[in-house]
Amino acid sequence: IATLQESTDWYCQGQPVEVMALTEHAGFAGAVLKAVETVTTPFLMVVQHDWAFVRAVDVSGVLDVMSTTPRVRYCTFMAGKMRNYLQTVRSIPKLKIDLRPVAPDHPVGERMYPLGILYDRTHVCRVEFWNEWIRTGIQRCRVRRAGARGGRGR
């Protein structure tokens, strides 16, 4: 087991990292939204504690593609069991997903493909994406829960 400092050094290569302790339960997405309030960059990387990289990942290449391709708002790092993602999605005729690489002329972008859903794993995304899409999703869930209970959401 690594100490917090050892694990942040590995991910952040000496860059400053702030660990936030929340005073109340916010759920995973709510906790990330709290952290997003302090982010001063256009992108953030959400590192799931229970997913590990098993090989080197070119995060700077992903950021380069995202910086030059505005339609790419979220990039997940797929698990090995998803290596057949393209074949699986292509085999489902109802899915209307354009499965061309998002940046065919870029060495990393040529291996990045559109997703039909968000995966609960480590990812890089635009801060505005988290602020818009995830915050809206949390609000919808709270409204549904409140309606099911006949009261107010959290």
Image (cartoon, rainbow, N blue to C red):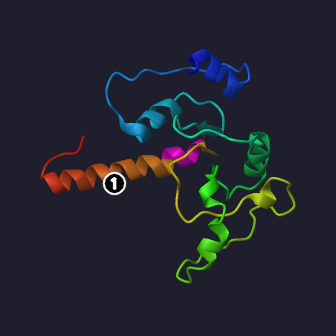
**Could you tell whether 88 is left or right of 59 in the image?**
left
> Which residue: 76% across, 40% down?
56
Report the amino acid beneath label 1. Arg
> Which residue: 56% across, 49% down?
129
**Could you tell whether 138 is left or right of 66 in the image?**
left
> Which percent across, then down, holds residue 146?
20, 51
> Which percent across, then down, holds residue 41?
66, 34
Front residue of 105/93: it is 93
**Chief SS of the magenta region:** helix
Residue 147 seen by the camera = yes
Residue range of the region highlighted in magenta in the rendering: 127-131
Check disc 1: other Cα within 10 Å, few if <14, some if 14-19, many if 20+: few
Whether residue 14 is situated above or below residue 115 in the rendered picture: above
> Which residue: 78% across, 40% down?
60
Residue ID for mark 1: 140
> Which percent across, then down, holds residue 149?
14, 52
Whether residue 112 is situated above or below residue 152 in the rendered picture: below
Asked if residue 137 lies in the magenta stretch, the reply is: no
Quadrant housing residue 89: bottom right
The quarter in which the C terminus is drawn is top left
